[in-house]
Amino acid sequence: MFHSPFPDIEIPEVSIYDDLFGSLTAQDAARVALIDPATGAETTYGALKAQVDAFAGALAAREVGIDTVLGLLCPNVPAFATVFHGILRAGATVTTINSLYTPGEIEKQLRDAGASWLITVSPLLPQAKAAAAAVGIADDHLIVLDGAPEHSEAGHPNLRELLMEQRTPPEVAFDPATHVAVLPYSSGTTGIPKGVMLSHRNLVANVAQCRVNIDLRDTDRVLAVLPFFHIYGMTVLLNLALKQRASLVTMPKFDLVEFLTIIQKFGCTYLYIAPPIAVALAKHPVVDQFDISTVHTVFSGAAPLDGETAELAGRRLHTRMMQGYGMSELSPVSHAMPYTRDDIPVSSVGCSLPNVVCKLIDTATGEEITEYGDDGQTRPGELWVKGPNVMLGYLNQPEATAETLDADGFLHTGDIAVAHRGDYFSIVDRVKELIKYKGYQIAPAELEALLLGHPKVLDAAVIGVLDEDKQEIPKAFIVPAPDSGLTSDEVMAFVAENVAPHKKVRRVEFIEAIPKSSAGKILRKDLREREAAGV
C-alpha cells in the first residue's frame, strides 16, 4: 500500500454548511465571496450566509427536508452558491444537472434521483419545464431563480420572492457521515450515468484534504469557469474557495476572449481549468493581447493534461502549473501536486492527499504492486483508493456499487497508474470504455443505446478517437440496415437532436459487423486496432 506523504488530518464531524459558514467572523463576513462579471455586483460572505439561511427557511416552509431531493439546473452564476448551500442547509439532497442537457436527459436524472423539485434559470426554463412535467413536478415546485412576473403568474417561485420571506432556517438533525448531501451523476468507469451518493462528511473531508495540497488563500480571486454542477467545480472551486474565504468570479460558459477579459478586468489570481483551456493558454495568439499577469497558479483537472502543454502554458503565462486527479466517486480529489514541492513533474498528478491510502493492482494477476523498478517507478497497475472522501455508493445500484467499492473500502478507479519514488503518481491509461471530451464524461453505452433506436441502424458501437487537436471525440461504427441509404450526416444529426452538445458523435464509419465476444460484449479493442491501422 502507498500512504500519503502528508500526516492524517482531523475531519470535522459537521455538515458542509457548518464547516463553511459556522466559523464566519465579522472580518470574514465583510470579505467578497462572489463577483458577477456581467454587472460587477459583489456579494459578501455575510450576505451570502444570510441568503443561504433565508433560502433554507423558505424551502423548509414548503416542507422540504431531509427526505427531499431537489434538482439544480443552473450555470455558474452567484445565485448557484445561494441555492446549492440553501438546499444543504435545509437538510435536503441536491442533484446537480448539466446545463447543456436536453429535456430527455434532465428527465432521466430527475426520475432516477427521485427529485420532487427543480431549480433553474429562465434561459433553461423550456427544457426544465418539459422535464418537470414529464416526471410530475408541479409548477410551484419549479423555481426560476431570475423569474419575471410572467413566471410568477405561471406559479413558478423566484429567488427574490423566496428570500424576501425572511424565513428562519430550520433545525435539522442528521448524521454527516451517512446523510446524502449531493447526487452528481457519473458513468463511473463504464456504463450509463449513475447517481453518486456523497455525504456531508465526504464533502467536508475533501475540502479539508485539498487545503493541504492546494495553496488557495483569502487574498485570491478565483475565476470560476468550470461548471459548479460538475463535482470538480462543486468541491475545488465553490466549496474550497468559500472555505478559504477567497473571492469567486463566476463565468456561465467558456469563451476564450471573455475568459481573458475577465482575468484582466477583475485581477484573477487562481485559475482552475480543464486541458482544452490549457491548450488555448499555451498556443492561441489572442492570449498575448491581454495582461493576465495577476495569475500566479493554474490548476488543471477533469482529464489528463500532457506535460509538454502544461510546461508551455506555464512558461507563456509565467505562472505555476499544477495538476490533480480524481473522480466523482472520490468527491472528487484523491491526488494533487503539492504547492510545497517543485521537484514533481507537471505531467504527474502529484501526491495522494492526507488520509488517503492507495493500492496498485496488476490487472492480469490481481496481485498488489509494491516494488519500485530501477527507473524509480512501479510497473503499471489499476489504482485503488481508500479515504474519507470515498462515496457511499451508487444510488439504487447495489451491483454497480459492489463492483466499484470492495469490502475493505477501496474504490477501484479503473485507471492505470504508476507510483514514483518521491511519493507521487502518474496516470498512464484509463478505462477504455469511457470517453472524455473536453473534460466531460461520455458513456459509449448511452450513445449506443440511442443509436440502436434509429430505424436504419442494425448495430452500433462507439469509441473515443483523437481529432486533429489531439482531443478525444466519440466515433460511431454503424451497421446500417440493407438498402437504407443511411448517411453519416443523418447519424450525427440524429444523435445531436437527442443529447447534450458534448456527447455528439463527431465521426461515423459504416461497417459490416460489430466485433463482439462470445458473450456478446463489444470488442472495442478490435475497433481501436482497426482505427489505428486506418482500415
Image (cartoon, rainbow, N blue to C red):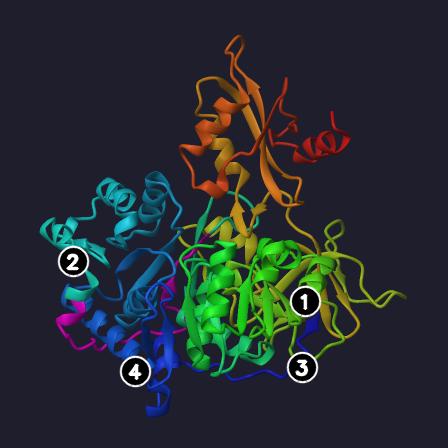
Residue 460 within the segment the image draws in magenta:
no
Residue 172 within the segment the image draws in magenta:
yes
Secondary structure of the residue carrying numbered label 1:
helix
In this figure, which residue is indicated by the disc labeled 4?
Answer: 46
- Tag shown at residue 340: 3
Q: Residue furthest bottom?
A: 26
Does label 1 or label 3 sit earlier along the sequence? 1
- Tell whether 290 sits left or right of 344: left
Q: Position of residue 463 (x, y in %)?
A: 61, 36
Does label 3 or label 2 sit earlier along the sequence? 2
Q: Is residue 201 visible?
A: no
Q: Residue furthest top?
A: 483
The label nearer to you, 4 versus 1, is: 1
Residue segment shown in magenta: 162-185
Secondary structure of the residue carrying numbered label 3:
loop
Quadrant location, the N terminus: bottom right
Q: Amino acid at mark 2?
A: Pro
Quadrant location, the C terminus: top right
Residue depicted at x 37% and y 79% = 32
In this figure, which residue is indicated by the disc labeled 1?
Answer: 314
In this figure, which residue is indicated by the disc labeled 2?
Answer: 157
The label nearer to you, 1 versus 3, is: 1
